[in-house]
Amino acid sequence: MGLFLYRNSCEIMYEQLINDINEQRTLKRYIKERDPYEILKNLVVSLVSGERVVLLDSDFSEEETRNLGLSAEELNEEIVLNKRKIDSFDELLTNIQENNDNWEIVLYTSGTTGRPKRVAHKLDSITRGVKMSEKYTNNIWAFAYNPTHFAGLQVFFQAFYNQNPMIYIFDMDRKEIESVLRKYNVTHISATPTFYRSILPYIGGVMPSVERVTMGGEKYDRDLENQLLNIFPNADVRNIYASTEAGSIFSAKGDIFSISTRIADKVRFAEDNELLIHKSLLGESDTFQLDGDWYRTGDIVERIDESHFRFVSRKTEMINVGGYKVNPHEVEDEIKKIDGVLDAIVKARNNRITGNILVAEVKIKDGIDKGEKEREIIRTLESRLQNWKVPRMFTFVDEIELTRTGKKVRK
């Protein structure tokens, strides 16, 4: 039946997945595993059984789980399974379809700021963007997301429903990724822009096998797309707008998203250009704060026309510097254009005079003099940006700190 998952030099076939599902007698309601295979296997078991499950990060501390309102008794709840033996992948899909109405998955948002929110999805909403047909059967996916979060689940369902192999590279040593992508002739990669930037220095040649490169979870970066096309010249690059609350909604070539006629009546823009989506597109959560029938996404956009927009920033990411609102993405984009800079993040630091000042963490190529590079960055920013947008402090780092989902930490 072919390869299901590769990780840490271990290959797990679809046949083994089915055997393991048949042998499993109980299922934990709260899936909190470190091994990606255990996470995905238990997810499939829940689908086959029609059982509601909750996905949690394996490194959630006791304090974090308490803050989510979860007790030790809940975390250890086990379900005794009553299911029939499965003999083939088609039979597996049939079982999942038969239990479609009963199944539900609960996720916790894990953005760059704020307390995680609990969101529940039925199978229809979480697989809204999944495509199935014979033309997808030869796809080979690089799995570059955390499998307990929405973006990772999107890759899983797209690959799983088409019985595709998944090559797990999310936690792989960056120096090993190129050889693994080549070994398995990966055709599809989906990751955050930050993840792509972290692997670019370690990829030494062109990879013609890659047909589709998808980026999401962070602001689109045209320079990054050009770098990716140099490595993956045959790839179609797509920019995805998705959220744990609503799932996959928009897709674009470049940074301008188009609102399809199918959901045109379910998308609005507030007076301050915050993107609003209708509650019918959302999963279920008791933490959603609706404005009538509309959910405020927290995303500030630039409206091109009534059916097109460009993402600008998260509302919570805008930084007030002496009364001026600064979009950190704008500053980061200018820093990343400078030769020798691999990545950067701009944050706020409290200041008793201006309220905040901007500080920047910058990752540069090996062997570059940090003092000279800092002077170059300051000179460049002063020539391109207003004074209040220029960071007052720079720190050079080996790696940019990431959230559990692979996004930059902006706290």
Image: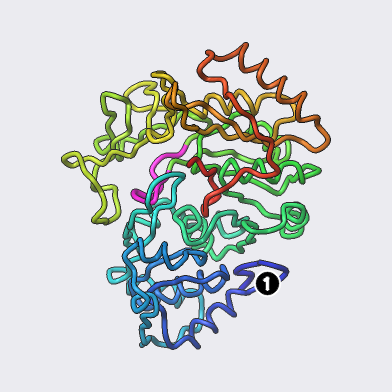
Q: Is residue 281 left or right of residue 317?
A: left
Residue lying at 29% horizontally and 50% vertically, measured from the top left: 282
Q: Which residues are magenta?
A: 242-251
Instruction: Report x, y in % for residue 366.
Output: 80, 38
Residue lying at 44% horizontally and 21% vertically, measured from the top left: 353
Foreground of the two, 405 or 304: 405
Q: Is residue 187 left or right of residue 322?
A: right
The residue wearing badge 1 is: 11
Q: Is residue 95 visible?
A: no
Instruction: Report x, y in % for residue 278.
Output: 24, 42
Magenta-drawn stretch contains 397: no
Residue lying at 63% horizontally and 61% vertically, measured from the top left: 168
Instruction: Report x, y in % for residue 370.
Output: 76, 30
The image quadrant that residue 15 belongs to is bottom right
Q: Secondary structure at mark 1?
A: strand
Residue lying at 40% horizontally and 72% vertically, measured from the top left: 30
| Residue at the extreme right of the image, as rendered | 367
